[in-house]
Image (cartoon, coloured by chain):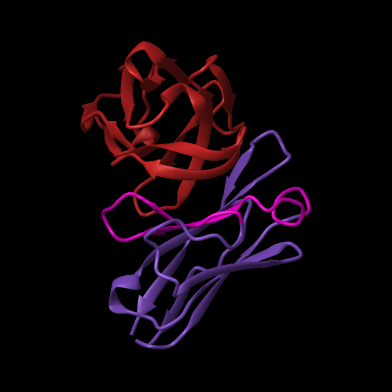
Amino acid sequence: QSALTQPPSVSGSPGQSVTISCTGASSDVGTYNRVSWYQQPPGTAPKLMIYDVSNRPSGVPDRFSGSKSGNTASLTISGLQAEDEADYYCSSYTSSSTSVVFGGGTKLTVL
Amino acid sequence: EVQLVQSGAEVKKPGESLKISCKGSGYSFTSYWIGWVRQMPGKGLEWMGLIYPGDSDTRYSPSFQGQVTISVDKSISTAFLQWSSLKASDTAMYYCATLKGSGSAGWFDPWGQGTLVTVSS
């Protein structure tokens, strides 16, 4: 069982917005702002989309945004495009011995 | 260009040993932690461990402690992941990635292209 909880799947139509949640605990998401999000299209390596809760690396469209409230972080994708269809994973620093925890992943389907 | 290049796909038998590699270039290899991540077929990402090339400080996920060994040769900017006795359940894609941020708290970027390990009799 993953340390961070994500919905298994979300979907939306082109142009719509979707939000993916990532629920952790006070030992990770609730205390630390080291939350990151990764996009993984089928057959490819993960790609960083958001770091430190809400920062976008260079080259990531501003349609992708991140936020956090309490023990839950969220990734919002606005203006959905077909190319956004992929698996999305959240990750957080944790004060437990593991140091790093991932969510179980969310499959985004663009209808 | 900052990149990590991993060794090629491997097909092994149960009980065999294996060492896969991850070579960094385009940045100060000894200044950032490198992590290893497992992805079993059709499953999610699992963090295995971290190594700091500057001093070889290593941390393992409890799930992988004792099951694998992470090492580094900073003279050739390469990190390694090895098994002494493979099991069929080790069949997976393995990714390396550079940990950015401060210390061992941060985000993974960039990622290697992955090494597919298949263990079958």
Q: Nearer the viewer, residue A59 or A42?
A: A59
Q: Is residue A26 above or below residue A109?
A: above
Tint applied to chain A in the drawing: purple
Residue A1 appears anywhere in the view: no
Horizontal arrangement in the rendering, residue B79 relative to residue A24 (left or right): left
Residue in the picture at 33% in, 38% down: B2
The residue stretch that appears in magenta: A26-52
Q: Is residue B48 magenta?
A: no
- x and y, in percent, of residue B61 in the image: 58, 33
Residue in the picture at 31% in, 24% down: B20
Q: Nearer the viewer, residue A59 or A36?
A: A59
Q: Nearer the viewer, residue A2 or A100?
A: A100
- x and y, in percent, of residue A41 in the image: 31, 61
Tint applied to chain B in the drawing: red
Residue in the picture at 58% in, 63% down: A54
Q: Is residue B66 above or below residue B49?
A: above
